Image (cartoon, rainbow, N blue to C red):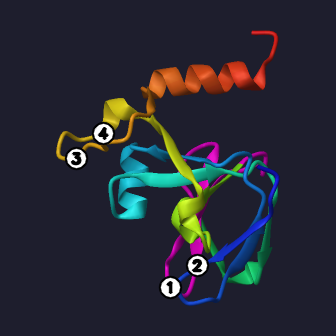
Amino acid sequence: MAERLSGGCICGAVRFAATPASDEMGVCHCSLCRRWSGGAGFLGVDCGTAVEVENEDMLGVYKSSDYGERVFCKTCGTTLFWRMQDGSDIVVSAQAFDQPERFRFTSEIFVDEKPDNYAFANDTKKLTSAEFFAAYAAQQDPSA
């Protein structure tokens, strides 16, 4: 995609510019993402490290695992980013972009944790948690 896009939180205290890796978005159905997003999972867009934030002091950070953290606006609570604690990867909330309709819904992860009370109609690539971690590990180690 290589186009820099803007976005922000509900109250406007946090604005960002990000360059998505592609025009695709996916959803994570893990229990943490469902609770964090308050819905049917976290709809995210992979932006690698290409995210610049205005007013970084307005960001709240919650370390949700040994490797990941969730980033939100301290003022209004808007879900903004999931990122690796080392900064090596940032997934931006699709709905935090000013034009979220630009993204195609293509994938679902942690489908083994998705409750039975909802389902998406889109034809997506689906990965269980084990399949996701295996694919991620292979992506990090090209010799694998």
Callout 1 secondary element: loop
* Placement of 56 over or under 106, stated as above or below: below
The mark lying in front, picked from 2 and 4, is: 4
Closer to the chain start, of discs 2 and 4, is 2
Q: Position of residue 107 (x, y in %)?
A: 49, 37
Quarter assignment of residue 122: top left
Decide: few, some or many residues near mark 3? Use Cα within 10 Å; few <14, some 14-19, many ≥20: few
Closer to the chain start, of discs 3 and 2, is 2
Closer to the chain start, of discs 1 and 3, is 1
Amino acid under label 2? Cys
Amino acid under label 3? Tyr
| Residue matched to label 1 | 76
Task: Tell me whether the residue at label 2 lies in contact with that at label 1, contact meaning CB atoms closer than 8 angstroms.
Answer: yes
Task: Tell me whether the residue at label 4 lies in contact with that at label 3, contact meaning CB atoms closer than 8 angstroms.
Answer: yes
The residue at 49%/78% (across/down) is: 77
| Residue matched to label 2 | 73
The mark lying in front, picked from 4 and 3, is: 3
On-image quarter of the C terminus? top right
The disc at residue 118 is 3
Left or right of 20, for residue 45: left
Q: Is residue 65 magenta?
A: yes
Residue range in magenta is 63-89
Task: Tell me whether the residue at label 2 lies in contact with that at label 4, contact meaning CB atoms closer than 8 angstroms.
Answer: no
The mark lying in front, picked from 3 and 2, is: 3
Query: Residue 71 versus residue 66: which sits nearer the camera?
Result: 71
The disc at residue 114 is 4
Q: Position of residue 96 (x, y in %)?
A: 57, 70
